[in-house]
């Protein structure tokens, strides 16, 4: 009976490890989507920068930057929640602090991009 319990615990541990790693992949996917949104903002400004009035292109680009910021922070919040619910076993996973730092750095980059787009 002991062997069966140990095997069941091993399977549970592995499932938690897989969930932790999937959480990291999902977080990374949302970070990529946010960065793509910033790229769209830059592209819109580049394509429609000469349009009159110029504030229209800047406003639309700002919507994509705001969407990126939302993605960064909602992904961080969700990753942190999932991370909290799991007991990390064997897998080497990122800490909650990592998720926050990545979201913060990308958010600062997005805000900086928005400032630059509005100053052009």
Image (cartoon, helix red, strand yellow):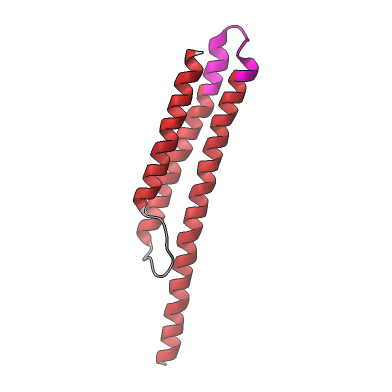
Q: Position of residue 37 (x, y in %)?
A: 56, 33
Q: Residue at x 53, y 36 (%)?
A: 35
Q: Residue at x 58, y 30 (%)?
A: 39
Q: Residue at x 48, y 39 (%)?
A: 71
Please tell me whether residue 6 is drawn above or below residue 110 in the rendered image.
Answer: below
Q: Nearer the viewer, residue 25 or 112?
A: 112
Q: Residue at x 63, y 15 (%)?
A: 48
Q: Position of residue 47 (x, y in %)?
A: 65, 18
The magenta segment:
46-61
Please tell me whether residue 25 is drawn above or below residue 120 in the rendered image.
Answer: below
Q: Nearer the viewer, residue 29 or 78?
A: 29
Q: Position of residue 22 (x, y in %)?
A: 51, 58
Residue furthest right as drawn:
47
Within the magenta stretch, is there residue 51? Answer: yes
* Left/right of residue 43 with respect to residue 85 in the rendered view: right
Q: Position of residue 99 (x, y in %)?
A: 40, 47
């Amino acid at each position: 009976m002991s062997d069966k319990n140990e095997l069941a615990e091993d399977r549970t541990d592995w499932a938690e490890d897989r969930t932790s790693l999937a959480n990291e992949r999902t977080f990374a996917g949302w970070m990529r989507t946010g960065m793509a949104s910033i790229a769209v903002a830059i592209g819109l400004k580049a394509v429609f920068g000469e349009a009159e009035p110029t504030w229209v292109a800047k406003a639309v680009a700002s919507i994509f930057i705001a969407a990126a910021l939302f993605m960064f922070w909602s992904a961080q919040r969700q990753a942190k929640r999932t991370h909290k619910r799991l007991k990390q076993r064997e897998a080497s996973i990122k800490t909650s602090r990592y998720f926050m730092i990545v979201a913060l750095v990308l958010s600062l980059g997005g805000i900086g991009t928005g400032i630059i787009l509005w100053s052009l």
